[in-house]
Amino acid sequence: MTMTADDLVAEARRTVDTITPADAHGFLILDVREHGELNSSGAIRDAIHIPRGLLEFKVDPRSDSAEAALARAHARGEQVNVLCASGGRAALAAATLTRMGYRAAVIEGGLKAWKAADLPVA
């Protein structure tokens, strides 16, 4: 069976946990939006930014190019809260992180919900 992008996102959403923006605020956040989106829509202060297309290479804790904060979170079993614009890429990323041994959750509604909750954006 051939799957569409929507099928893959739906499958990922069924397999990952979710967290509200308010509950994620102040904890480890991984933003998987592209750099241009950060510039145009704003960024969450102290979030780690890794575009979705580079995720697997930057989160492998055995890799020399792994993001140090994520490797520490992996080692400690800390949850990584994943965000994108509205939730699709974050669901795919969280599912990948889970398969790679991380505890991961999708921030419900992405940056749109974050802003709607009046949480800070730089």
Image (cartoon, rainbow, N blue to C red):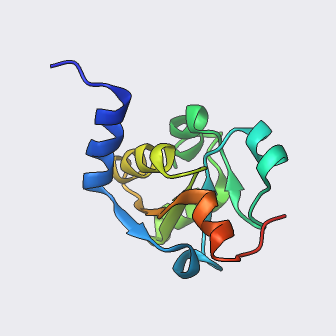
User: In which quarter of the view is residue 24 placed?
Assistant: bottom right
Corner quadrant of residue 29? bottom right
The quadrant of the rendering that contains the C terminus is bottom right
Residue positioned 68% across, 67% down in the render: 115
Q: Is residue 14 above or below residue 96?
A: below
Which of the two residues, 111 or 50, is positioned nearer the viewer here? 111
Is 19 positioned to the left or the right of 58 in the image? left
| Left or right placement of residue 60 versus residue 10 in this view | right
Residue at 44% across / 72% down in the picture? 19
Can you say which quadrant of the picture contains the N terminus? top left
Q: Position of residue 105 (x, y in %)?
A: 43, 63
Extreme residue in the left direction: 1
Q: How many marks?
A: 0
Residue 25 falls in image quadrant? bottom right
Residue 55 point in image, percent of width and height: 55, 40
Identify which residue is drawn at 63% across, 59% down: 111
Where residue 72 appears, as percent x and y from the top left, is 57, 64
